[in-house]
Image (spheres, helix red, strand yellow):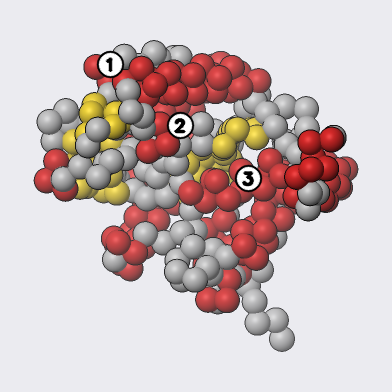
């Protein structure tokens, strides 16, 4: 008797990821996990160019900035506790001066815009349907940057709102890169700050929205079941990290393997494994040897 509910590689996207064209990954921290593995396997992968983003509205806003190659100005950033921040960006863009902060942001937008025109695949990982809205500006923020909680209101986007917003985004993307394959995922990382029930409602909302989007764009959009693999196939706490929320390295590698078998052909997979072996060998070369290479 089989005591597991396995999830097989998905069909219809084999060969979309190769060494010939860039892959861009944007979204929650699970994006970082898969994106870093793609880099270690030798792919030209650009991972979260605007930093880790969790909600569909902030991810959409980030993509619009990239598509229109927006230039951020001093009016778009703010100072808090001696550092300059952007509500649209992760804390890694924080800086001690406005010039440095803006330079980081605008350089990231310019380099990503160029990659997006060439990319074969864009993966989008939604983390939560809950958003924080800045009271003064009414802006949905990507990061609260430790401002006082009273600065924001909290709400949950509906599946209809997410679907309507992203339908426009996908049209914009395909107008510039008609052959782009968009792979949606929902992060398997539970947001327990929302409560177990709140997390379930949030993830269900994201799943409903992505399902509608894939129905609208069957030739260009696909869903990869990272959430289902973690919840159904790996439903055991031995596949979780010490915090019992994030997937363990074993789980991440297992999900990546299914992702690779879905989106790559056998030759690409074999070559990527050889690249990974070389990458790991480099990690064990003494520093003095690396300087001689």
Give 16 or 12, whichever is nearer the viewer.
Answer: 16
- Badge 2 or badge 1: first in the primary sequence: 2
Residue of label 3: 36
Residue of label 2: 50
Q: Report whether residue 151 is seen.
A: yes
Q: Which residue is drawn at 12% across and 31% down?
A: 136
Which residue, as the protein is rendered here, is positioned at the far bottom? Answer: 1
- Please state the horizontal and vertical placement of residue 228, each as a whole percent of the image: 54, 61
Asked whether the residues under the numbered discs 3 and 2 touch, taking CB atoms below 8 Å apart as contact, a structural biologist would say: no
Q: Residue at x 55, y 19 (%)?
A: 111
Give 95 or 266, whichever is nearer the viewer.
Answer: 95
Q: In this view, does 283 lie above or below 1?
A: above
Residue of label 1: 74
Give 135 or 103, whichever is nearer the viewer.
Answer: 103
Q: How far apart are marks 3 and 2 (CA)?
A: 15 Å
Bin the neighbour count of mark 3 within 10 Å (Cα to Cα): few under 14, some 14-19, many 20 and up. some
Q: Distance between the residues labelled 2 and 1?
A: 18 Å
| Residue 191 as seen in the image, left or right of residue 242 | left
SS at mark 2 in the image: loop
Q: How far apart are marks 3 and 1 (CA)?
A: 32 Å
Q: Quadrant of residue 4?
A: bottom right
Bin the neighbour count of mark 1 within 10 Å (Cα to Cα): few under 14, some 14-19, many 20 and up. few
- Please state the horizontal and vertical placement of residue 156, each as a whole percent of the image: 26, 48
SS at mark 1 in the image: helix
- Badge 3 or badge 1: first in the primary sequence: 3
Bin the neighbour count of mark 2 within 10 Å (Cα to Cα): few under 14, some 14-19, many 20 and up. many
Which quarter of the figure is the N terminus placed in?
bottom right
- Please state the horizontal and vertical placement of residue 85, each as a whole percent of the image: 30, 30
- Please state the horizontal and vertical placement of residue 179, each as a whole percent of the image: 65, 24
Q: Which residue is drawn at 61% across and 43% down?
A: 35
């Amino acid at each position: 008797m089989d005591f597991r509910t396995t999830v097989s590689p998905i069909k219809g996207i084999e060969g979309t990821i190769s060494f010939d064209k860039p892959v861009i990954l944007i979204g929650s921290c699970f994006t970082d996990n898969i994106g870093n593995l793609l880099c270690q396997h030798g792919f030209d992968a650009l991972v979260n160019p605007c930093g880790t983003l969790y909600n569909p509205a902030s991810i959409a806003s980030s993509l619009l900035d990239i598509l229109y190659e927006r230039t951020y100005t001093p009016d778009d950033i703010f100072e808090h506790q001696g550092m300059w921040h952007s509500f649209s960006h992760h804390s890694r863009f924080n800086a001690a001066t406005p010039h440095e902060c803006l330079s980081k942001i605008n350089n990231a937008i310019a380099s990503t815009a160029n990659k997006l025109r060439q990319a074969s695949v864009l993966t989008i990982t939604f983390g939560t349907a809950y958003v924080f809205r800045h009271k003064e500006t009414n802006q949905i923020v990507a990061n609260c940057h430790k401002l006082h909680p009273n600065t924001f209101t909290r709400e949950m986007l509906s599946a209809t709102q997410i679907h309507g917003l992203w339908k426009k985004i996908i049209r914009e993307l395909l107008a510039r890169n008609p052959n782009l394959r968009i792979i949606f995922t929902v992060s398997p990382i539970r947001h327990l700050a929302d409560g177990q029930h709140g997390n379930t409602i949030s993830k269900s909302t994201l799943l409903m929205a992505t399902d509608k989007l894939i129905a609208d764009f069957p030739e260009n959009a696909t869903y990869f079941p990272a959430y289902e693999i973690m919840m159904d196939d790996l439903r055991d706490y031995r596949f979780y990290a010490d915090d019992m929320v994030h997937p363990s390295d074993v789980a991440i590698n297992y999900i990546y393997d299914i992702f690779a078998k879905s989106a790559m052909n056998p030759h690409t997979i074999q070559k990527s494994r050889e690249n990974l072996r070389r990458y790991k060998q480099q990690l064990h070369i003494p520093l003095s040897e690396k300087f001689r290479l």
